[in-house]
Image: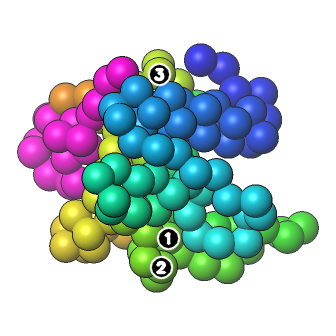
């Protein structure tokens, strides 16, 4: 999948997250604004959880956990500073990952993760392949 703009990435990530959670029996709620740290609220069996959606089209499948903006693209915040239940990720090959943010915190990840469909060659780093999902 080719993303021409960051907006394309964002739209694809959100659309695939809605499709994944909807297909797996969740009620999916989309907030009316984008000032919160989550993109979706999902509910199943009376349990409500929040989801941050990210997508990447980079060759190395890196997902930044930082938020940047302004004219210089300065970092202004970090995902794990907030109470979000899940990180939903989409890579350029349409692979999807649902990662509990508590696992990211427990592992002590840095400012980015690399999405992999298989265990890393040296067995080091956060093993995202364990969180790969499909429709």
Label 1: few (<14), some or many (≥20) within 10 Å? some
Residue 129 in magenta? Answer: yes
Q: CA distance from mark 2 to mark 1?
A: 6 Å
Identify the image quadrant of the N terminus.
top right
Contact check, label 2 and label 1, Cβ < 8 Å: yes
Label 3: few (<14), some or many (≥20) within 10 Å? some
The residue beneath circle 1 is 79
Give residue 11's position: percent from left, percent from top.
70, 36
Give the residue at the far right of this rendering. Answer: 71
> Where on the picture, by quarter, is residue 73?
bottom right
Which mark is first along the chain, 2 or 3? Answer: 2
Label 2: few (<14), some or many (≥20) within 10 Å? few
The structure residue drawn at horizontal position 89% and vertical position 67%, both measured from the top left corner, is: 71
Q: Is residue 96 visible?
A: no
- Identify whether 82 is placed above or below 42: below
- Identify whether 80 is placed above or below 46: below
Judge by depth and name the residue closer to the eye, 22 or 3. Answer: 22
19 relative to 67 in the view: left or right: left
Give residue 67's position: percent from left, percent from top.
63, 67
Residue 95 in magenta? Answer: no
- The boundaries of the magenta stretch are 119-135
The residue beneath circle 3 is 94
């Amino acid at each position: 999948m080719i993303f021409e703009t960051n907006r394309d990435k964002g739209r694809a990530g959100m659309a695939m997250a809605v499709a994944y959670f909807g297909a797996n029996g969740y009620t999916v709620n989309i907030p009316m604004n984008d000032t919160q740290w989550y993109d979706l609220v999902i509910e199943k069996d009376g349990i409500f959880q929040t989801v941050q959606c990210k997508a990447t089209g980079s060759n190395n499948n890196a997902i930044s956990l930082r938020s940047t903006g302004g004219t210089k693209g300065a970092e202004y915040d970090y995902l794990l500073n907030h109470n979000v239940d899940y990180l939903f990720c989409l890579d350029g090959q349409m692979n999807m990952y649902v990662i509990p943010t508590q696992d990211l915190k427990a592992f002590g990840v840095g400012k980015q993760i690399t999405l992999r469909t298989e265990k890393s060659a040296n067995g080091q780093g956060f093993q995202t392949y364990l969180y790969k999902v499909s429709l």
